[in-house]
Image (cartoon, grey):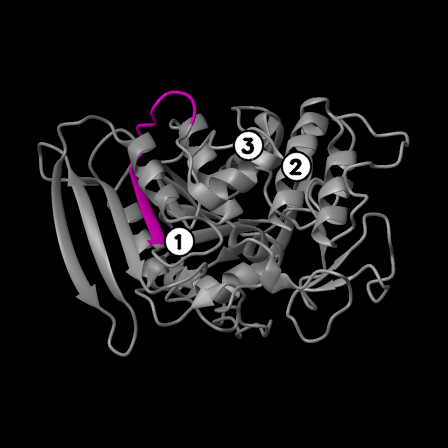
């Protein structure tokens, strides 16, 4: 299996570089099913790079099953049961590399409930939409009941693969904190037309640049909310999990004039990959970011037992956003009662203000630390990433110290 995947990765790389993303996807799907003929994909017409194609794999987020590209029958003989309940093809998930297994399905910390908590009286959690030259994306916006007349901070939350705005809101419980602190929270939603698993396409060069592709859409959503609501333009922040964490890193690097701080949970540095095969390699081994260093204050959460996105990637996000080599470093260790131990490293400027903060959750996996089992990819045993991110965010404003 390892030898087959290695040779197929090389062929998939060639196809991706030629712009044949659909053929590369089909090739990897056949390899993962154990099809010995995978290295010889059938000839067919392939959509161009500008057309909407499935860039990774088609996964049902509720059942965890992979289906053949173009197949509408999730129970067919080509399906792979990602949860391992019953064999439905030639490959069982435990045979796959950790990075691929976690990327395709739900982690061990994943909850399956999608129940919505009742809103406080006067609060709103409503769907909206944004369109520009890069396309259209929907988003959910939480408006707290405790809003006053003053302009409010805005936090933009980017979900992980297979997730949705509602799922991500339930798992992170960021809306509860927004109610407590008087913040707006936006949850842009990726579409299956743009990515079969609803992943943000952080590995695509077309989606890593300012005012192009998905960064243009996310920035457009942010600015639309700023236009339509009472938002404090100096207190706008972006955070994400996994693929959404990688997208948040891209947004911080591309829009330092828009976002006052960035939160990256279990993600990767901007430019860590340039195509699908290099994305798998970066997830498995870590990869430094490409391009110039960022300068936006950044908080990173990553678990040291993450088998989906190597924890080395957290170090590389910190390195990418480091302003200088003269920051003073302070380290702390702690323990969640009945939960995980953790290490916290702060990088302080000359005034003693933390501009970078890194949390390593010891023994945790690929999941939002301290999250609720009401959402997917959560680990309630970890320190509360949502609360710590919001604390870090509110301590940073565009153009200087909060005041």
Residue 273: image location, x then y, percent: 52, 32
Q: Residue furthest bottom?
A: 338
Question: Circle 2 sits in a helix, a strand or a loop, which is it?
Answer: helix
Q: Is residue 204 magenta?
A: no
Query: Which marked residue is nearer to the observer: mark 2 or mark 3?
Result: 2
Lower sequence index among marks 2 and 1: 2
| Residue 133 seen anywhere in this rendered image of the structure | no
Which range of residues does the magenta coloring cover?
A: 290-302
Residue 259: image location, x then y, percent: 39, 35
Q: What residue is pinned by disc 1?
A: 183
In the picture, the quarter occupied by the C terminus is: top left
Q: Do the CB atoms of the residues marked 1 and 3 lie less than 8 Å apart?
A: no
The residue depicted at 51 percent of the width and 46 percent of the height is 244
Q: Tell me the crowding category of disc 1: few under 14, some 14 to 19, or many 20 or more residues within 10 angstroms, Cα based.
A: many
Q: What residue is pinned by disc 2?
A: 7
Q: Nearest the camera: 362 or 215?
A: 362
Q: Nearest the camera: 372 or 176?
A: 372
Corner quadrant of residue 88: bottom right
Residue 175: image location, x then y, percent: 45, 62
Mark 1–mark 3 Cα distance, whole angstroms, equals 22 Å
Q: What residue is pinned by disc 3?
A: 215
Taking the image as shown, residue 191 lies to the left or right of residue 140, namely: right
């Amino acid at each position: 299996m390892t030898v087959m995947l290695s040779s197929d990765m090389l062929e998939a790389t060639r196809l991706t570089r030629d712009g044949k993303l659909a053929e590369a996807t089909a090739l990897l799907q056949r390899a993962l099913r154990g099809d010995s003929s995978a290295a010889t994909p059938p000839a067919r017409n392939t959509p161009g790079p500008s057309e909407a194609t499935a860039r990774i794999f088609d996964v049902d987020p509720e059942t965890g099953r992979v289906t053949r590209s173009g197949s509408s029958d999730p129970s067919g003989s080509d399906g792979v049961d990602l949860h391992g309940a019953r064999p439905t093809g030639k490959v069982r998930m435990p045979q796959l590399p950790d990075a691929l297994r976690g990327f395709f399905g739900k982690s061990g910390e994943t909850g399956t409930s999608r129940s919505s908590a009742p809103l406080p009286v006067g609060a709103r959690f409503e769907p909206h939409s944004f369109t520009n030259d890069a396309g259209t994306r929907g988003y959910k916006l939480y408006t707290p009941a405790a809003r006053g007349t003053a302009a409010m901070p805005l936090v933009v939350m980017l979900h992980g693969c297979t997730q949705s705005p509602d799922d991500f809101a339930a798992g992170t419980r960021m809306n509860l904190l927004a109610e407590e602190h008087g913040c707006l929270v936006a949850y842009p939603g990726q579409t299956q037309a743009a990515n079969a698993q609803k992943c943000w396409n952080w590995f695509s060069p077309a989606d890593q640049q300012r005012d192009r592709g998905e960064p243009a859409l996310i920035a457009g959503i942010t600015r639309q909310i700023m236009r339509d609501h009472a938002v404090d333009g100096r207190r706008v922040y972006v955070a994400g999990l996994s693929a959404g964490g990688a997208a948040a890193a891209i947004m911080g690097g591309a829009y330092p004039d828009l976002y006052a701080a960035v939160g990256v949970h279990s993600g990767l540095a901007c430019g860590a990959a340039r195509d699908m095969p290099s994305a798998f390699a970066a997830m498995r081994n870590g990869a430094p970011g490409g391009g110039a260093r960022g300068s936006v204050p950044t908080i990173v959460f990553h678990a040291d037992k993450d088998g989906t996105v190597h924890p080395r990637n957290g170090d590389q996000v910190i390195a990418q956003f480091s302003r200088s080599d003269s920051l003073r470093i302070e380290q702390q260790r702690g323990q969640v009662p009945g939960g995980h131990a953790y290490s916290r490293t702060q990088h302080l400027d000359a005034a003693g203000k933390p501009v970078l903060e890194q949390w390593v959750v010891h023994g945790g996996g690929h999941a939002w630390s301290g999250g609720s089992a009401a959402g997917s990819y959560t680990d309630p045993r970890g320190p509360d990433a949502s609360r710590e991110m919001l604390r870090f965010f509110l301590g940073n404003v565009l153009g200087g110290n909060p005041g």
